[in-house]
Image (spheres, rainbow, N blue to C red):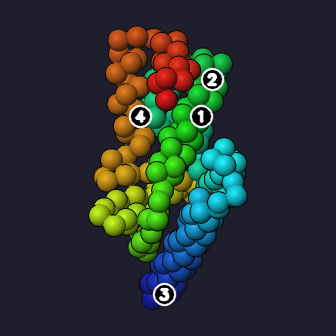
Amino acid sequence: MKNLLIAAIILLLFFQSAAADDKSKIDNLLQTNLEAVFTVLQKKDLDQQAKNKEIVDIVTPMFDFELMARLSLGKKHWSGMSQDKKERFTELFIKRLKASYLSNFTLYTDEKVLYEPSVQVKEKIHTPTYLISKDKKISILYKFYKAEKDWKIYDLEIQGVSIIRSYRSQFSSILESGTVDNLLLKLEDPADN
């Protein structure tokens, strides 16, 4: 019994150490990448299109866009789609999500980011940050999960509002009164981005 207790304590200490390492890794990953994005935004010699390309190159490896697409539809709607429509939806969703992310960065002036330590939530890790400007403090919570090789962002909460839940609500509303084709047409419409 004593050996079993010692083994359990050692295992618990190992998992706490691994979780601390993961949280530290995520903190460093997020800070490094966001600082790189803000460096790009401050470049005077680049036009907005060149800045956008550099920003997408920096942030894309951090996100699991395919998972975000599936989560934004929910199991009910995702499982009912053909493979072709899943692929088309995913492509259009990623395009929309990147455009939305970039449009938020174009509003950048001289804000600073305040980072708080990551928090383990079950098998996921949440990293709270705050975008601080002269008169505002905007909370942004980055939600990570362990992918095959690395930690990836699967959702963002801005001022407590989940991006995934927000899209799921919009998409469900369209699908309740229409079809997947209606949703795809809506996503294809550039005026709707």
> Is the residue marked by circle 3 packed among few (<14), some (14-19), or many (20+) residues within 10 Å?
few
Q: Nearer the viewer, mark 3 or mark 1?
A: 1
Q: CA distance from mark 2 to mark 4?
A: 16 Å
Mark 4 crowd level (few <14, some 14–19, many ≥20, 10 Å Cα): some
Q: Identify whether 72 is placed above or below 6.
A: above
* Residue 88 image label: 2
Residue nearest the viewer, comparing 1 with 160: 160
In terms of secondary structure, where does tag 4 sit?
helix
Q: Which residue is mark 1?
A: 95
Q: Residue under label 4, please give it.
A: 167
Q: Nearer the viewer, mark 3 or mark 2?
A: 2
Judged from the image, the secondary structure of the residue bearing numbered disc 2 is helix
Residue bearing mark 3: 6
Q: Position of residue 50 (x, y in %)?
A: 70, 48
Question: Looking at the picture, does residue 152 appear above or below residue 4?
Answer: above
Q: Give the SS element for disc 1.
A: helix
Q: How far from the left and from the top, in percent, is residue 86? A: 60, 24
CB within 8 Å, label 4 to label 3: no
In percent of the image, x 59 and y 28: which residue is there?
92
Q: Is residue 150 above or below residue 19?
A: above
Label 4, label 3: how far apart the Cα atoms are = 48 Å
